[in-house]
Amino acid sequence: MSAALDLASHATQCVFRSMQFEDIDRVAEIESEIHSHPWSRGNFSDSLRAGYGCWVYLSGNEMIGYAIVMSVLDEAHLLNIGIARDHQGRGLGRALLKHITDFAASHGAAMMFLEVRSSNKNAIALYESTGFNEFSVRKGYYPASNGREDAILMGLTL
Ligand SMILES: CC(C)(COP(=O)(O)OP(=O)(O)OC[C@H]1O[C@@H](n2cnc3c(N)ncnc32)[C@H](O)[C@@H]1OP(=O)(O)O)[C@@H](O)C(=O)NCCC(=O)NCCS
């Protein structure tokens, strides 16, 4: 099987479902592995209680990713997305993002917005190749190891 087919079939075998409170331990574990300033368990449980769109992505029984989306009128805000480190770079982040944008569009969202660290070149490349455009820069928005870091605000018409 070619590499491209292998990557595509991996994503099609994955399951996208709503996050449950029982998922939070594993979600928070992945989060702490992939972010310099991770969300806490409380941030994820608050998101579930607030009724945000909270999703997990599974390969068999293994959780490999998650995403959190807050909806305001016809705007969807992607607050968090992550793929477990060992599974990155195999097309799964792109597939998970497509599930999220498709779900938001089919539930009435006209736009999706997100903020991303200016240093996060991999994520920015994913968003740009999905069709997100840069709207503005929030100076010093994020804490960083050497002070503060800018956020790029991006938006996608759904
Ligand atoms: C950003 C993230 C979700 C992407 O998921 P992924 O499964 O690694 O990405 P994919 O394999 O689907 O690749 C999608 C695109 O991302 C970009 N990308 C991903 N890994 C990359 C790398 N190592 N180098 C350069 N570009 C990369 C490419 O544009 C790629 O498209 P291509 O394969 O057609 O070139 C994942 O890397 C992650 O969880 N990172 C840590 C958490 C994070 O930064 N979240 C986003 C916060 S805004």
Image (cartoon, grey):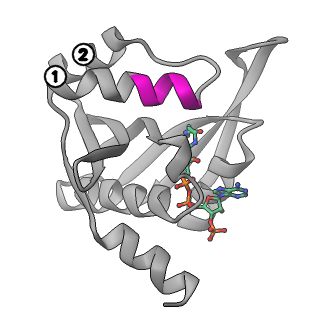
Q: Earlier in the sequence, mark 1 or mark 2?
A: 1
Toward the viewer: 46 or 84? 84
Toward the viewer: 111 or 51? 51
**Vertical placement of 73 versus 133: above or below?**
above
Magenta stretch containing residue 33, yes or no? Answer: yes
Kind of residue at badge 1? Phe
- Place residue 71 in its image quadrant: top left
Q: Residue at x 34, y 13 (%)?
A: 41
Q: Is mark 1 in CB contact (under 8 Å) with mark 2?
A: yes
Q: Nearer the viewer, mark 1 or mark 2?
A: 1
- Place residue 43 in its image quadrant: top left
Residue that badge 2 annotates: 45
Q: Residue at x 35, y 40 (%)?
A: 66
**Vertical placement of 2 versus 112: above or below?**
below
Kind of residue at badge 2? Ser
* Image quarter hosting the C terminus: bottom left
Q: Position of residue 79 (x, y in %)?
A: 43, 32
Q: Which residues are magenta?
A: 29-34
Q: In terms of secondary structure, where does tag 1 sit?
A: helix
**Vertical placement of 152 versus 38: above or below?**
below
